Image: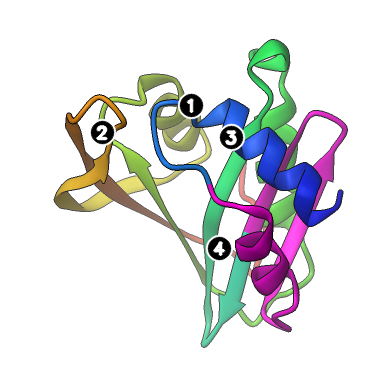
Amino acid sequence: MTADEMAAVHARAFDQERAWNAAEFSDLLDSPFVQAFTHDFGFALTRSVAGETELLTLAVDPGHRRKGIALKLLRRWLDAPTKSADTAFLEVAADNTAAIALYLDLGFATIATRPAYYARKNGSVADALIMQRALTCGQVTE
């Protein structure tokens, strides 16, 4: 998936927030620490450094949600052989209940909150939950 394609999917997936543009995706993809996990209708972008791996963004085209795509992308990230990482992190909007449920099912727990972190196009804001889970030898545990 190209940076332009990622930007298009991201814009559709995050239509209530500022979507990332192709130049931002291109810059991230040029980093040796960033990894992209792609699907025809979505992608996960992650960064692994200093014993940690972080989900930078996860986007699934709205017309293809609730089909297991996000779960497949997350499993590919958590199972990836990057693995000097022993901890995985992510941030999610506190009102994104579907994503939070998925992350909890994968063993993530909320460790902190960033108040009013996400600015919405309509002027409202949402807190960000910072979630973390331990990795066993860098692998997903069931």
Q: Which percent across, then down, holds residue 38? A: 81, 45
Mark 3 belongs to which amino acid?
Ala
Above or below: residue 41 compared with residue 45:
above
Q: Which color scheme does this rendered protein use?
A: rainbow
- Ranked by sequence position, the earlier of labels 1 and 4 is 1
Mark 2 belongs to which amino acid?
Ala
Which residue is the site of mark 3?
11
Q: Which residue is at the far left?
A: 115
Residue mark closest to the camera, 2 vs 3: 3
Q: Secondary structure at mark 4?
A: loop
Badge 1: residue crowd in 10 Å (few <14, some 14–19, many ≥20): few
Say which quarter of the image contains residue 120.
top left
- In-image side of 57 versus 61 (left or right): left
- Ranked by sequence position, the earlier of labels 2 and 1 is 1
Badge 2: residue crowd in 10 Å (few <14, some 14–19, many ≥20): some
User: For residue 40: magenta?
Assistant: yes
Q: CA distance from mark 2 to mark 3?
A: 20 Å
- Ranked by sequence position, the earlier of labels 4 and 2 is 2
Q: Secondary structure at mark 3?
A: helix
Nearest the viewer among 65 and 141 is 65
Mark 4 belongs to which amino acid?
Leu
Which residue is the site of mark 1?
15
Residue bounds of the magenta highlight: 20-45
Which residue is the site of mark 4?
135
- Ranked by sequence position, the earlier of labels 3 and 4 is 3
Badge 4: residue crowd in 10 Å (few <14, some 14–19, many ≥20): some
Give the residue at x 33% y 46%: 109
Give the residue at x 57% y 28%: 13
Above or below: residue 99 compared with residue 48:
above
Which residue is the site of mark 2?
94
- Ranked by sequence position, the earlier of labels 2 and 3 is 3
